[in-house]
Image: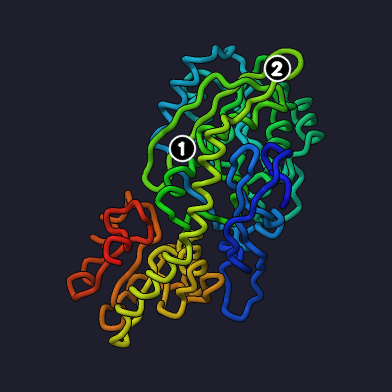
Amino acid sequence: MSVCRVCCVGPVEGTLALGRQPVSSHFAARDRHIVTHDLSLGVCLACGVVQLVEPFPFRDLVPPYDWITYREPEEHLDAVVDTLLSRVTLPADAVIFGLSFKDRTTLDRLKRLGYPRCHLIDVVHDLGSTTPNANIESVPGLLTPEIARRIRAERGPAHLIIARHVVEHAEVAGRFVAALSDMLAPGGTMVLEVPDCTANLRRQDYTMLWEEHVAYFTPETLPQILAAPGLTSIGLDIHPFPFEDALVLTAVKRHGAADGTHTVPTEAVARNVALTRQYAEAFGLWTERYRQWCERLTRDGRKLALYGAGHLSAAFVNFHGLGEYFALVVDDTPQKQGLHLPGCGLPIVAKDRLNSNQIAACLMGFAPQIEDKVIANNAGFQESGGSFYSIFADSKRSIRNVL
């Protein structure tokens, strides 16, 4: 057993080994070498955090193209800012840091509310990256305590740090949050947003797993990352979304030393361990059911298609070994067309290749919120006999509804 990457004390029980998997952002020509590593899931028996047993090195995760970006839900950000300002009072000249491009729109909201000293941390200028295209995957690896203290000396101690969807990328979450704490002034505030893995564990959706996400938090396990840096939680909010909710943890840096540790309740640890074991045990059963369904739909010689050449689609087809049943991946991003989905090697094409004479069904690998729009834009495929399904368990069009 390895040692937990969050509490840094407990043993991690390996539960699900997925073998060698590619870096899903490394779209390439078919003959290009693809970086792969062993991908295994585990759970800490002491604190209950679900995590990768051995994370991919962050430098191996840097995408090969400068046009690759990531999108997170933002419908809740007005509420996040309103709640934050109801809990803390910021001075008019507050120094505010955002950790990545994902925080830009939150900083824009704060600027409009009269806080002009907002700074977005730059992975090259501030963190010293020399790797082209370094992005969110590199922030936790590059932000050492030394660099954090230098940023604080150059720009002043922060009254507020916003860090959306970055903590889960850290190889050692507590160490990363400690570096963030070094940038804060005494009494300063930190807002951390991460995905909530609870629902996907329960419904046994394996597309949740991504080589870039090391830790998978729940409302009960997230607050413990505050203990070592001397931060105290002043609020944990859950914002509901399809696929996975957003957890927003607000904390304050108390004057002086750390004021104790956050202990995950024993019953919560036991619940997470049991849930993760069940998640792992069911993987083979779901894989077999997916394969049987794919066999039925492709008996007439037609193949299947994926829509959306992202890490979720790659996880679905690669983890379950379904590549043989698919002919192509449709994606509306022009730069992806002509490349191949890492792992299975499926060609990425434009939507005009979605023809029901060759394609029996199309499986959608994007947020359920936009399924109606995409289907409407591809009405000809459905009208000629093609079918749309979602790879996600929580979609109303989920493939699981017809297995």
Q: Amino acid at mark 1?
A: Ala
Q: Amino acid at mark 2?
A: Asp
**Residue at 53% of width from left, 33% of height from top?**
267
Residue 103 seen by the camera:
no
SS class, disc 2: loop
The image shows residue 121 at horizontal and vertical percentages of 66, 37
The residue to which callout 2 is attached is 259
Q: Nearer the viewer, residue 298 or 338?
A: 298
- Disc assigned to residue 246: 1
User: Vertical placement of 169 versus 163: above or below?
Assistant: below
Label 2 or label 1, whichever comes before in sequence order: 1
Residue 215 seen by the camera:
yes
Asked if the residue at tag 1 contacts the one at tag 2, i.e. Cβ–Cβ closer than 8 Å, the answer is no
User: Vertical placement of 343 versus 197: above or below?
Assistant: below
Q: Nearer the viewer, residue 110 or 45?
A: 45
Q: Hey, which residue is sitting farthest left in the picture?
A: 383
What whole-number distance in Å separates the C-alpha atoms at marks 2 and 1? Answer: 27 Å
**Residue at 68% of width from left, 26% of height from top?**
227
Tag count:
2
Q: Quadrant of the C terminus?
A: bottom left
The image shows residue 299 at horizontal and vertical percentages of 31, 85
